[in-house]
């Protein structure tokens, strides 16, 4: 594993290089680690994760974007619970990457309570203040303020799940009353966001297979409050090629707008349709 050089006393965040790499392969999302002197951004378009967790006017304004987008793109209104589900996905997918990308690239796991994360969805811009992070023995980042060394890879995986749960738990509480889903279904969505976000970014990094193996170890199906496993399996393409897919633990409800156009990992999508969607057109 290649690690950036970090010297005692540096102001570089332990996650800066990971977030820079994320922006390189996925320019539509920029994650920025704030230092202690920088205020969290505010103003037009910005929302703090704590505002989403509160479930009030901040969440109302956030979901108004999804409602307008659906009406503009599909010429119809979606049910309020469907809009809430879209909004949760569009926040949770990038928010999970704040934790999983540094873990995947550098074996560092930041803690990101809702008070320390802000999001500007139109710009694809996240900011986070990392006050604490876990790392492995021998990591030069262990000399940085807020570092906490854990024993091994298993302990670091536990830190990933704990960090995401600490962040998403309050957010799910904020969205939950609008979504007409129980706790288990909401945590199934959280499971999907962890897996599908890192799986997609790892594909862009050229490390899809490693990510699949690590996600399977991360989510074996027995860790509460998460629901289900990473869910990966293999299909066979028309020329005998292997086509990786997975079975989602939840449904995004897009079928309520376009019943014929389900996601490739949707529980409603049969294997024949998955093969067709995953096979490049001749």
Image (tube, grey):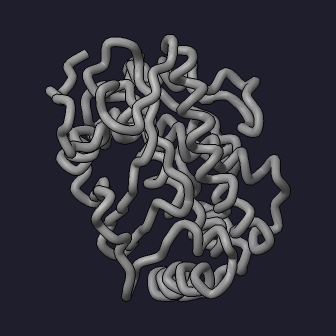
* Residue 14 found in image quarter: top left
74 relative position to 21: left or right:
right
Quarter of the C terminus within the rendering: top left
User: 29 or 265: nearer the eye?
Assistant: 29
189 relative position to 30: left or right:
right
Q: Point out residue 170 in the picture as x, y percentages from the top left corner.
A: 68, 59
46 relative position to 105: left or right:
right
Whether residue 261 appears in this view of the structure is no
Residue lying farthest to the front in this orientation:
9
Vertical placement of residue 252 versus 58, above or below: above
* Residue at 46%, 28% in the rendered image: 148
Vertical placement of residue 91 versus 154, above or below: below
* Residue at 25%, 28% in the rendered image: 206
* Residue 133 found in image quarter: top left
Total numbered circles: 0
40 relative position to 223: left or right:
left
Q: Point out residue 238 in the picture as x, y percentages from the top left corner.
A: 42, 25
* Residue 127 found in image quarter: bottom left
Quarter of the N terminus within the rendering: top left
* Residue at 61%, 64% in the rendered image: 254
* Residue at 58%, 55% in the rendered image: 262
Q: Point out residue 155 in the picture as x, y percentages from the top left corner.
A: 56, 18
Whether residue 35 appears in this view of the structure is yes
Q: Point out residue 105 in the picture as x, y percentages from the top left corner.
A: 31, 29
Vertical placement of residue 273 versus 94, above or below: above
User: 132 or 186: nearer the eye?
Assistant: 132
């Amino acid at each position: 594993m290649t690690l950036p050089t970090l010297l005692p006393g540096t102001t570089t965040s332990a996650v800066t290089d990971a977030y820079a790499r994320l922006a390189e392969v996925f320019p539509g999302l920029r994650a920025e680690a704030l230092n202690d002197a920088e205020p969290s951004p505010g103003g037009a378009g910005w929302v703090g994760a704590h505002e989403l967790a509160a479930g009030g006017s901040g969440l109302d304004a956030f979901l108004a974007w999804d409602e307008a987008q659906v009406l503009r793109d599909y010429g119809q209104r979606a049910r309020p619970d469907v809009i809430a589900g879209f909004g949760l996905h569009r926040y949770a997918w990038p928010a999970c990457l704040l934790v999983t990308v540094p873990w995947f690239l550098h074996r560092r796991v930041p803690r990101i309570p809702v008070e320390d994360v802000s999001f500007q969805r139109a710009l694809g811009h996240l900011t986070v203040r990392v006050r604490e992070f876990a790392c492995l023995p021998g990591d030069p980042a262990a000399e940085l303020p807020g570092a906490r060394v854990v024993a091994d890879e298993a302990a670091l995986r536990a830190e990933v799940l704990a960090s995401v749960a600490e962040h998403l738990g309050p957010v799910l509480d904020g969205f939950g009353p609008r979504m007409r889903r129980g706790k288990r279904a909401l945590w199934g969505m959280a499971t999907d966001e962890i897996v599908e976000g890192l799986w997609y970014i790892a594909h862009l990094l050229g490390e899809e297979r490693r990510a699949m193996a690590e996600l399977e170890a991360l989510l074996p199906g027995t860790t509460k409050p998460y629901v289900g496993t990473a869910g990966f399996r293999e299909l066979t393409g028309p020329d005998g090629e292997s086509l990786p897919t997975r079975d989602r633990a939840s449904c995004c409800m897009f079928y309520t707008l376009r019943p014929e156009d389900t996601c490739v990992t949707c529980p409603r999508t049969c294997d024949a349709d998955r093969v067709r969607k995953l096979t490049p057109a001749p």
